[in-house]
Amino acid sequence: MEKKDLTELLQKVADGQTTVDEAILKLKEAPYEDLGFARPDFHRELRQGAAEVIYGAGKTPEQILKITGSLREHGQKTVLITRMKKEAADLMLKEVKDFSYDELSHIGIAGELPEKTGKGKIVVATGGTSDIPVAEEAAKTAEVYGNEVVRLYDVGVAGLHRLLAHKEDIMSARVIIAIAGMEGALASVIGGLADCPVIAVPTSVGYGASFGGVSALLSMLNSCASGVSVVNIDNGFGAGYLASMINHIE
Amino acid sequence: MEKKDLTELLQKVADGQTTVDEAILKLKEAPYEDLGFARPDFHRELRQGAAEVIYGAGKTPEQILKITGSLREHGQKTVLITRMKKEAADLMLKEVKDFSYDELSHIGIAGELPEKTGKGKIVVATGGTSDIPVAEEAAKTAEVYGNEVVRLYDVGVAGLHRLLAHKEDIMSARVIIAIAGMEGALASVIGGLADCPVIAVPTSVGYGASFGGVSALLSMLNSCASGVSVVNIDNGFGAGYLASMINHIE
Amino acid sequence: MEKKDLTELLQKVADGQTTVDEAILKLKEAPYEDLGFARPDFHRELRQGAAEVIYGAGKTPEQILKITGSLREHGQKTVLITRMKKEAADLMLKEVKDFSYDELSHIGIAGELPEKTGKGKIVVATGGTSDIPVAEEAAKTAEVYGNEVVRLYDVGVAGLHRLLAHKEDIMSARVIIAIAGMEGALASVIGGLADCPVIAVPTSVGYGASFGGVSALLSMLNSCASGVSVVNIDNGFGAGYLASMINHIE
Amino acid sequence: MEKKDLTELLQKVADGQTTVDEAILKLKEAPYEDLGFARPDFHRELRQGAAEVIYGAGKTPEQILKITGSLREHGQKTVLITRMKKEAADLMLKEVKDFSYDELSHIGIAGELPEKTGKGKIVVATGGTSDIPVAEEAAKTAEVYGNEVVRLYDVGVAGLHRLLAHKEDIMSARVIIAIAGMEGALASVIGGLADCPVIAVPTSVGYGASFGGVSALLSMLNSCASGVSVVNIDNGFGAGYLASMINHIE
Amino acid sequence: MEKKDLTELLQKVADGQTTVDEAILKLKEAPYEDLGFARPDFHRELRQGAAEVIYGAGKTPEQILKITGSLREHGQKTVLITRMKKEAADLMLKEVKDFSYDELSHIGIAGELPEKTGKGKIVVATGGTSDIPVAEEAAKTAEVYGNEVVRLYDVGVAGLHRLLAHKEDIMSARVIIAIAGMEGALASVIGGLADCPVIAVPTSVGYGASFGGVSALLSMLNSCASGVSVVNIDNGFGAGYLASMINHIE
Amino acid sequence: MEKKDLTELLQKVADGQTTVDEAILKLKEAPYEDLGFARPDFHRELRQGAAEVIYGAGKTPEQILKITGSLREHGQKTVLITRMKKEAADLMLKEVKDFSYDELSHIGIAGELPEKTGKGKIVVATGGTSDIPVAEEAAKTAEVYGNEVVRLYDVGVAGLHRLLAHKEDIMSARVIIAIAGMEGALASVIGGLADCPVIAVPTSVGYGASFGGVSALLSMLNSCASGVSVVNIDNGFGAGYLASMINHIE
Amino acid sequence: MEKKDLTELLQKVADGQTTVDEAILKLKEAPYEDLGFARPDFHRELRQGAAEVIYGAGKTPEQILKITGSLREHGQKTVLITRMKKEAADLMLKEVKDFSYDELSHIGIAGELPEKTGKGKIVVATGGTSDIPVAEEAAKTAEVYGNEVVRLYDVGVAGLHRLLAHKEDIMSARVIIAIAGMEGALASVIGGLADCPVIAVPTSVGYGASFGGVSALLSMLNSCASGVSVVNIDNGFGAGYLASMINHIE
Amino acid sequence: MEKKDLTELLQKVADGQTTVDEAILKLKEAPYEDLGFARPDFHRELRQGAAEVIYGAGKTPEQILKITGSLREHGQKTVLITRMKKEAADLMLKEVKDFSYDELSHIGIAGELPEKTGKGKIVVATGGTSDIPVAEEAAKTAEVYGNEVVRLYDVGVAGLHRLLAHKEDIMSARVIIAIAGMEGALASVIGGLADCPVIAVPTSVGYGASFGGVSALLSMLNSCASGVSVVNIDNGFGAGYLASMINHIE
């Protein structure tokens, strides 16, 4: 409940148009808006057409279809669905006209991508090709939130020239997402090159002593480069969301 | 770009052989090609008086004194020294006039704090009073880099009203540093309240199954709130540096 | 063997109605009752109709059917079956009239729920919707043992208003079960709000550095709120059983 | 803000006694004051003379002396100080008349123990003699909160007869605190004997693969006995506090 | 090469019956034959009819059939096959007359069990019914090596009377194998009751913080009872083999 | 309560010599007295002069002196004190005539070593010289319990010839204690050579990824040699005690 | 240095405009300036027909077929494909004439093995038969890079004579790859016998406390033998590649 | 016992110059030489003046002095002492003329460094200045074994230009030792640049989630660069020894 609505409600009470009991009921039902703890500006953006996100894991195709429909009926123009299984995508492709699905990253998007409202470019870099699914989750999340994304895939440190060849992209980014499994050294090297915030995403790519991403996670937490922070293993969405947040800072 | 090259380039500009625009282009491109990679704009800031940092751990009092002197001779106005032992501080206090030392956070600062150049406010919040040394490392680092810092200490989630009483500070921050040991829940709760980037710093505060900060670290990495990223255990400096970087984004 | 039975037996020996050898045999066969180590009051309750529990994991449908039948023949009115697979439920549904099955929590109940004998209300709260299977195991266990249960699902700390909207339920509970995966912060926040015992149940919900529930487990063990204790990961039954025990304290 | 207050406020708006703007302000400010999240009944008890706790670790002797004085001036009759170092105790013994200190458990108590208000007895049992410091922290905490405590020390499972000799204490307890290091089996064995809640406290006692209490912690979390829950390693205070809470349930 | 053989060889050199070169060759080749490091007496026993063991995991049904045939052709009367899959057992049952298979423990035995040659009885005890597969691997291994085995299954410590009812078996055993998952307390309790060696076998039975047997393993390693040693998680064969070794000590 | 006693009691009831109430009382009280669970034969041995053990860690010099005196007054001829600090030893050396102390292993012995009553020899082998303190704890424990001990120190597998040179000792042992830190391979190699039980003791010797003995512990638990079992890290006493137990099997 | 530049440089040499020495200098310096960094000499070898490697995991059969074709068109004589699934092999076998596949090690090789260019022999030893898949990955990698490989399989330390029987192979190797799971002792024993570099490969073979290769990994890292280094768990390729590198040192 | 000596001995037996009994005795006493398990060529080198190593940790100053003297009396020209405490060095400096000590690396060397007999150069690189003590242990070890060492200290990946500035050293090395703590990325980056074997040494440098070197260790084991292998945390000696071994391969 925005301040405007609250003012209106109270005015109605003052004017006798609404009884005290009705007002109590309304104030009780609307707790999330009037207490307003949760990101209100962000919600407003959403109401203006940006993407509300559906975490697809553990939801049935029918549930996803239904929630998507409901969101769009309430005026949302773009709906992002993460960790979406193929079965769900198949149903959506059949039922929803402007739906697209990326099998690699398990990302589905209903509606068109919004305008680019971010201030600069977000670079999404990966150490290897196996990290691309996580990278696409990050990149598509950033795009759905209105950011221009530059993809630098397979630029791992074992072939440093591949990374250095993209020096200009790195230097001109507003925020960089560095995604790597195995030894996770990419974040440190990029952190040393760049002068913008670097969000490091460890991936579960690897075998043996990579322990499902622990090796890359520790490596990134211990980065000797300044300006690097870390999100959970394989958390492409979290990185994309945070990068967008930073890229929209005014 | 070596000094010789720079001289030559500037002479050509002086002689009209190179236009200013061409020279700018060269200077912008140069550092990465011939020397290098590392944060050049940032370095320029440093040369203009901002704080170069000395990592005090493992350095003798004499070494710290000498490096500080050298930095200031080269024109640096403020020198930040982290993880500085009391012995080193005692020597500095004796030898350096405008030096101040905070025993709690082991932070020493030579010179005056610079002007506030950050765009907004950085909130530094802690779960308990035992997290304050790490918090002060973060806060003082941010201040030395020209940021306004709001300190919210001892607002842990076990007494939620303490945190909620500062809702406005949280809602109006440009970036928040959430510092907590033990169960590290502060980052999630703040992440749920705020709509700006939250940098979570796990601390080694706690006992038993806190395992020197691992409990808080895992908690923060698994935060269900969006916009939260994590730095190493007790890494107040890293959080302060990154917060400043975000707060200076134009 | 209750004291009454023992008195009777010895009286018969004294009266010559039972020989010494027969008495020895009886005393030897009845060791569990006469030594009486195991929860006898509780057993009596059970014999009076409360639920004996069958741990369904690793038992064949036929075994479960047979044990259920046997328990009911001995007068038990309600039989709770935990971690029960669908195949077993299908057989039970076919063969047992008053059997019901909850696919989400893998809980089966044969017979009707007993009267509410608990002194107050047990609140079962979860951080997210994915924690509901564990929560239902806890809630149904508590119900089968004669407790009134209030369910507060999806009230995780990343949207604090959701939890605060149920403050009255939390304040009026006699015991609370706080169930959460990922960062497990719910237990601390509820522990800070409530003034009754809080049983924390970490769940294996999450990915990456949640390590199958370890993150939530450590978080809960390190809770800075007083009055919080912890059971094993995903142990909804254990929490429901303990909550009932506390709720029946006279 | 209780419903009554809300009704009153809205009535005033309806009556024109309060302007819309004033009402908005009140509704916005209210939540933190009137929600009053933290254990209010408990606080009242405290104000009536029960023990407020000072966590002594990391506080100077002077700070402890000052806080104790302040609490007593506000009418608190008993002050419990945990994890208190000998230096602090020495100062307190010198300055505070009715102060007593237990060097083993590092517990200090200023003032007299309150009346026994708990409903039943709390049994505090340990596996070995090395667990006694943690046990005394639990026992004294429980006593300071008005409970009768029965101490069963050194009744570890490797000599089962020692434990079985105290079967009646175990059977008649209202709540039991089972404290053990090394393999932590005590909690399971007591949990199997007793029919009341058992709070298990792993201790850091042991060497080698006990890993500072991890072995006992895991053992207790995996207890096959029902009614057992666990607190952090060495957390005697937490166990004593929770036991008192359960023992005061009406 | 025994001393006798060496003397003989050197005598032949002294006598000119063997040339220096031949002697060098013999001395060079000899060590592996004459040192004969690996359990020679034990091998002799095996050749005399005791069981050679086939580790079935990772072997094809045909390989197992073939090795079994080969061993029996060389005079072995009983062949033990551990961790044998049902497919392999099906082939064996079809092709080998005196073959028997236990699906629970995945143990196959070709030939008859040998005479009991052990000096006393081996007790195999388990905490729960889920530990029985590991227990049967241990028990059948011991039987194949000529031991009398007493099985005490489902005597876990959460119902202590179940274990105490078998006190006499425990007191009269020559060696005991204590098998348990979850909190693994059985080994300590039996170790405290018995005065013979106790071989503890942690099992991977459990969930959550049992971590595939780690909880039971640590518990057993930290047993406060003397006379307890531990083998690998689920290693029923190793325990049965070692128990037989101890039971055959003269 | 043995069968004989029970018969007698019941007979008295039948005879009217004992009332029913008295019998109930006796049956209720009896178990702890007459079952007498803990190692009674062993205790008898002890009373006949064998060593009772004092775990010296955490006991004051005065306590150790007093307990030793008390044990000897009750007729014990030899008293073993493990993990004894030098201060305690100094007091004992001053006060107790026939006391000896080994600074390396922190073992003190009051009284003379008993006769050799073990059936064979116990070999105590170590990988390196740094493992000797643990080895001496094991060896002296075994000696105090009446065993002949053969010490093979510094025979680690990196110089295999050192171990092979002692093949005869290994082949003729009745039980072997294999003690090693770092990679702990000694247990496997000895287990492969010997045909008697091998008790493996991991030590905390090593650095880096030895993790205080974890590396050796895991290595020993995973030994591919049969007949090997493991005790806790640095648990020389436990190994010596178990070895003695096996060596005394008749 | 692009092909065009190389052509130009060489033309200048041909024309006498650049001396050979100058050209050598340019060629030596070049790679790092324009393209760079990665192993140029090694690349040259590759261009001359040695094996380029395809990491088969995560690639479709069609992708593998296509890359193989492309490499061979560019003149590569032998193509090594690691971690290749059977489906991919089936396609390759159908489409590529000189392709061979080893199902055990999941290694495919297109083209003939090159000449032996290594200076000496590489010994590949395993502890057990289950380690052979990793060993074959190492061995075939070494062969594809032009090395003579001696295979010593199933020579684990629990039967030391098996290893000692091959002492001459071990003593005459230029580099040894020691591959073992479970306790991983093989590396230490071989390291103690040999005087050449030993590359240790832990395998995930084992169960229980082998933790997927962690036990062997720690064991090998802590090897008390000098000259031993370690690669990742199951990393046969890495070991084979490094062994070849050492075996080609001039 | 070399073949020559054996021939001679047997010839004497054949000639009657040596009796059979004397020959038996000799063969029995000489096991290490005639079986020749341990690195004989290497030992020969040592006898010719190269460095025998003393592991100083846990040895008294007197012991070190004595062993050094003994080695030199037997003709050794250079003695390397690792992990040597200052007290021991002080004694040595006083008693041994040509002794030198490096306090940083705790390395002592008695005698002069030998001639450079290695084939090429060994590069020792570190990520930071705090890694230098480990690096010096590696470098000095390599020098004592006759190698030319190039030191590249503080060339960590967070400032990539520092490393790239030494490209030629890296390209021309015969073997490289890459030493780093924290995130340990140096090994991967160097492994990607170089075409010679890289020995990675994780150090315990760092704090928080570096876990005493575990982060760097895992990072290095998971290196995506080929040709990299790893030794134990802080094991400078092991790396130096292996590097020398590789550098001496003919």
Image (spheres, coloured by chain):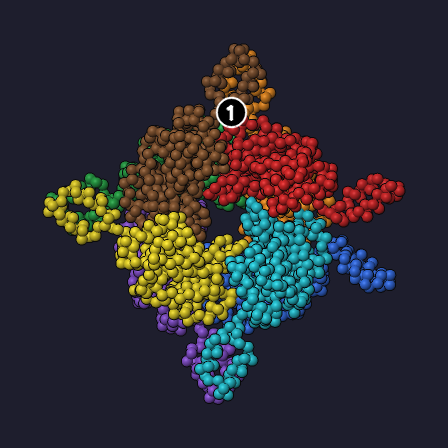
Chain colours: A orange, B red, C green, D brown, E purple, F yellow, G blue, H cyan
Q: Position of residue G134 (x, y in %)?
A: 55, 61
Q: Examine the rendering and report whether any part of residue G114 can be seen.
A: no
Looking at the image, residue E248 lies above or below residue B199: below
Q: Along the line of sight, which residue is nearer the eye, A139 or G147?
A: G147
> Which chain letter matches label 1?
D
At 28% across and 51% down in the image, what residue appears? F37
Looking at the image, residue A148 lies above or below residue H124: above
- Kindly state the secondary structure of the residue where label 1 is placed: helix
Task: State which quadrant residue H47 falls in.
Answer: bottom right
Task: State which quadrant residue G60 falls in.
Answer: bottom right
Q: Along the line of sight, which residue is nearer the eye, B41 or D66?
A: D66
Three-letter code, disc 1: Tyr
Q: How many marks?
A: 1
Q: Which residue is label 1 attached to?
A: D32
At 38% across and 60% down in the image, what residue appears? F140
Looking at the image, residue C245 lies above or below residue F71: above
At 41% across and 35% down in the image, what residue appears? D108
Number of residues whose C-alpha sits closer than 10 Å to that of mark 1, classed few (under 14), some (14–19) or many (20 or more): some
* Left or right of E6 in this view: A151: right
At 68% across and 62% down in the image, what residue appears? H148
Q: Along the line of sight, which residue is nearer the eye, E134 or H142?
A: H142
Q: Position of residue E172 (x, y in %)?
A: 27, 58
* Left or right of D122 in this view: A238: right
Q: Which quarter of the image is occupied by the C terminus of chain B?
A: top right
* Left or right of C45 in this view: D142: right
Q: Position of residue G77 (x, y in %)?
A: 68, 65
Q: Examine the rendering and report whether any part of residue B210 can be seen.
A: yes
Looking at the image, residue F202 lies above or below residue C167: below
Q: Position of residue E36 (x, y in %)?
A: 44, 73
Task: State which quadrant residue A6 falls in.
Answer: top right
